[in-house]
Image (cartoon, grey):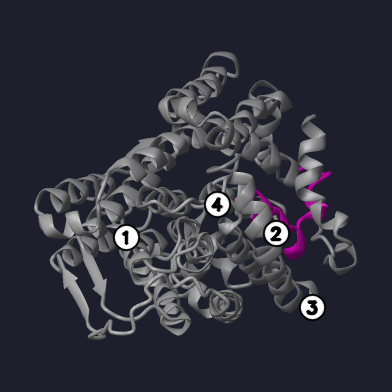
Amino acid sequence: MRKAFLYVVLLLPLFFGFSSAFGNPSPDTESTEISSVNSVMQVAEPEELQEEGEHHAPPGWTVIPFVALLLMIATGPLFYEHFWHKNYPKIAVALAVMVVAYYLLVLHNTHGPVHALAEYVQFIALLASLYIASGGIMIDIDKKATPMANVLLLFAGAVIANLIGTTGASMLLIRPFVRLNKTRIKPYHIIFFIFIVSNIGGSLTPIGDPPLFLGFLRGVPFFWTLTHNLVPWFVGVVLMIGIFLALDLRNKADADPSEDVTYTGQIRLIGWRNFGWLAIVIVSVFLDPNVFDWVPGIHYDGQTFSFIREIIMFSVAYLSYKYARNDALKGNEFSFEPIREVAFIFIGIFGTMMPALELVGNFAASPEGAPLINHNSLYWGTGMLSGFLDNAPTYINFLTAAMASQNASINQIAEVVAFANGEYHDSILDLKAISVAAVFFGAFTYIGNGPNFMVKSIAEQIGIKMPSFFGYIIRFSIPFLLPLLLVIWLIFFAFAPT
């Protein structure tokens, strides 16, 4: 089971016939492997791997709780909705506890759970603060709903996502987008909003999407993503908006038969002071002890974890809600349920996905897997896992594997900078493939990126019947998103010189 799982992920491009485009592996890939103890966040020396690997590597069957959680997320709302909505917090926590307990009591591995906990706290602090602060801002667009108005809003969202993050942009614009289309709203409006604003749009800055933010904290220069992802971002956004426009032009469901309705064309903003809270969140993302020595941190096992940033973010979440204008909250129909659902679901995901990420990371840096590491396999491997795991730890895992395959460590900022600057064989192309894939493929399922689930939950609270987990994939991801991902691969990676 273990090898089958690993080969499916890293040999996925072979099934599509991509092997002819693969680059040559770099020499001397056998001397460095990812430690199973620290596979997501830390690279161990080869001697440590030989000593620790036998005791701490999870068996293949440990991915079962993660697979079970995914299946329940997919089937619960469809086949046992009442039971799922009542018990999903208990189920998610129970499955996470099972895996964490196995790591602690059987594998005697505290590193994985501690790193997963730290990543979860960082993840939920950012999402909660952006969600609550933006919930106190009401944008009312008094315009007639037209396909072109929707296109302009989606493109604006794709730009704004790079300034306040995909979560901030999604929470700020999803309600105005729904209100604008209140007489003609369809599920595809929400899905393409997730594609464009909640994912692809945030490709240009580390603030844009959590995977890129983690890369920045590890040493990737701030403007690296703008320099290298700008053209893929533009192509992806324009093509996806073009597909949306073709669908929206066919939507004749405007339910308002009156020809006497007049629109002022004005945009009304209530709760503008909450932009100040959003600004505090954005500034605080840079307060990381791994970037600035003067920022205090928690030291554990050679790693330094931030806590000042998270305290600020949780404080913003509390204060921005306490002092928000009631008419803005009421106009937005603000509720804590979407962030509550994300918080519990992702406790389960972060807790249960540790073995999956670790097994893939170990295999990628092994003598069997290292020769498969190149920009093509990194694009499809990072992408497919980002669609079904959270894309932030997936980004770190594959960057760790890519650097380890070239005898470089993700824990050395100087080596990460060198990797980003192309001082290793094909490293710029490798990092670009990881970055683009993590962000773009994050839209493939509801759980690929945090904002996806929140946008879905908000839409359902408003009364829009959203497709199920599998319905989302079958009706939208496969026919619309997958061809775009293939086009991006063909243009930017398939025939790139090595």
Q: Position of residue 198 (x, y in %)?
A: 46, 62
Of helix, strand and loop, which mostly describes the magenta segment? Answer: helix
Q: In the rendered structure, find residue 478 and report the number of the disc placed on it.
A: 2
Q: Label 4 belongs to which residue?
A: 391
Q: CA distance from mark 2 to mark 3?
A: 29 Å
Residue 103, by quadrant, is: top right
Query: Which comes sooner in the sequence, label 2 or label 3?
Result: 2
Q: Position of residue 366 (x, y in %)?
A: 77, 42
Q: Label 1 belongs to which residue?
A: 286
Q: Secondary structure at mark 2?
A: helix
Q: CA distance from mark 1 to mark 2?
A: 36 Å
Query: Which comes sooner in the sequence, label 3 or label 1?
Result: 1
* Up-down relation of residue 491 to residue 359 (above or below): below
**Residue at image location 41% in from the left, 70% down from the top:** 255
Q: In the rendered structure, find residue 497 and report the number of the disc placed on it.
A: 3
- Circles 4 and 1, Cβ within 8 Å, touching? The answer is no
Could you tell whether 444 is left or right of 112 in the image?
right
Which residues make up the magenta segment?
Answer: 365-386
Q: Secondary structure at mark 3?
A: loop
10 Å crowding of disc 2: few (<14), some (14-19), many (20+): some
Q: Give the label, 1 or 2, closer to the camera.
A: 2
Q: Amino acid at mark 3?
A: Pro
Query: Which comes sooner in the sequence, label 4 or label 1?
Result: 1
Q: Position of residue 420 (x, y in %)?
A: 57, 68
Q: Amino acid at mark 1?
A: Phe
Q: CA distance from mark 4 to mark 3?
A: 27 Å
* Up-down relation of residue 140 to residue 482 (above or below): below
10 Å crowding of disc 1: few (<14), some (14-19), many (20+): some
Q: CA distance from mark 2 to mark 4?
A: 18 Å
Q: Give the label, 2 or 4, closer to the camera.
A: 2
Q: Secondary structure at mark 1?
A: loop
10 Å crowding of disc 3: few (<14), some (14-19), many (20+): few
